[in-house]
Image: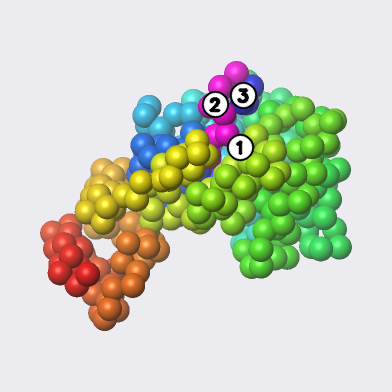
Amino acid sequence: MKIAHIEFPEKPLFLAPMEDVTDPAFRLLCKQYGADMVYSEFVSADALVRSVKRTAQKLTIYPQERPVAIQIYGRDPKTMAEAAQIVAEAKPDIIDINFGCPVKKVAGKGAGAGLLNNVPLLLKIAEAVVKAVDIPVTAKTRLGWDDEHKIITELALQLQDTGIQALAIHGRTRAQMYKGEADWTLIGEVKNNPQIHIPIIGNGDITTPQQAVEAFNNYGVDAVMVGRGSIGQPWIFSEMKAAIKGITPTPISYQEQVKIIKQHVLNSIEWLGDEHKGIVHSRRHLAATPIFKGIRDFKSTRIAMLRAETLDELFSIIDSVENMR
């Protein structure tokens, strides 16, 4: 499978862009454990153009995580084009446009999934970004605004005409947010449309190796994008890779999982250049990781782990869990 000039193995797995999740610290681990491409957190075009420091920091790319896509969002074609040119200076492999974020602070202001209510503007943004840079441009969107307006089959063709090089589709409407089940039937319909010649990437509810296999086999997508199922467990990609190859995944030992979780904290500290900030930034993954599930009377230890202020304190608490299992 190829996106523009970038070649991927058969049935590739991508790490989905997620706010406060897919920073370089986490992307490196996902790449190490099998993700074929990783995406940045979504980056505000307005903030980039205003040179907001925290936003500019999201453009950090490490050589070992390539190929990597940086995703931008906004509601103004000119600003989005200017932001894309700023992003291009960071030299990502792909610039991705967010037409799918459902949260109120994005969609409610007419960006992300909010643009599904204004398709002409959505297409103008795609055209403006494609024309602004030489880097391949892709897009990520949803089925539509709500059940009465599932426009993805037509929208996919319209986006293809703007010059984007691939399209990722989340199998929910904006109205669904992240509730209910993702509907992959329309994703498969887009992929199997003979008029579609760009790669179609399926996204939504891929949390187990078997689900990844079924997504490829049942819907024929070119790639599968893994989102929330990877939080706190970047090794999920290695398990999915094995299943796709027809190999029974070898479970990663608890000790190895702990080692990976600790490495993520260390990566975060290195990226942010501050021990406390790195620990705080890792807490979402520590809270979500499945490795501590099923441990009896774990609540107080979990609270202590998420309140730890120093690396020594945090790692000491994590190490103490071994005696609780």
- The x and y percentages for residue 307 are 26, 70
Q: Quadrant of residue 192?
A: top right
Q: Residue at x 42, y 37 (%)?
A: 34
Residue on which disc 1 sits = 223
Question: Disc 1 residue type?
Answer: Ala
Q: Residues within 10 Å of mark 1 (few under 14, many from 20)?
A: many
> How far is the residue under mark 2 from the one under mark 3?
6 Å
The reply to whether residue 45 is visible in this rendering is no
**What colouring style does the render use?**
rainbow
CB within 8 Å, label 2 to label 3: yes
As helix, strand or loop, the secondary structure at mark 2 comes to loop
Residue on which disc 3 sits = 2
Q: Residue at x 16, y 62 (%)?
A: 319
Q: Quadrant of residue 216?
A: top right
Whether residue 217 sits left or right of residue 234 in the image: it is right
Say if 244 sits above or below 252 in the image: above
**Which of these two is toward me, 259 or 141?**
259
- The x and y percentages for residue 298 are 27, 76
As helix, strand or loop, the secondary structure at mark 1 comes to strand
> How far is the residue under mark 2 from the one under mark 1?
9 Å
CB within 8 Å, label 2 to label 1: yes
Residue on which disc 2 sits = 8
Quarter of the picture holding the N terminus: top right
As helix, strand or loop, the secondary structure at mark 3 comes to strand
Quarter of the picture holding the C terminus: bottom left
Question: Disc 2 residue type?
Answer: Phe
Q: Residues within 10 Å of mark 3 (few under 14, many from 20)?
A: some
Residues in magenta?
A: 5-14
Dot 1 or dot 3: first in sequence order is: 3
Residue 194 among those drawn in magenta: no
Question: Disc 3 residue type?
Answer: Lys
Say if 108 sits above or below 63 in the image: below
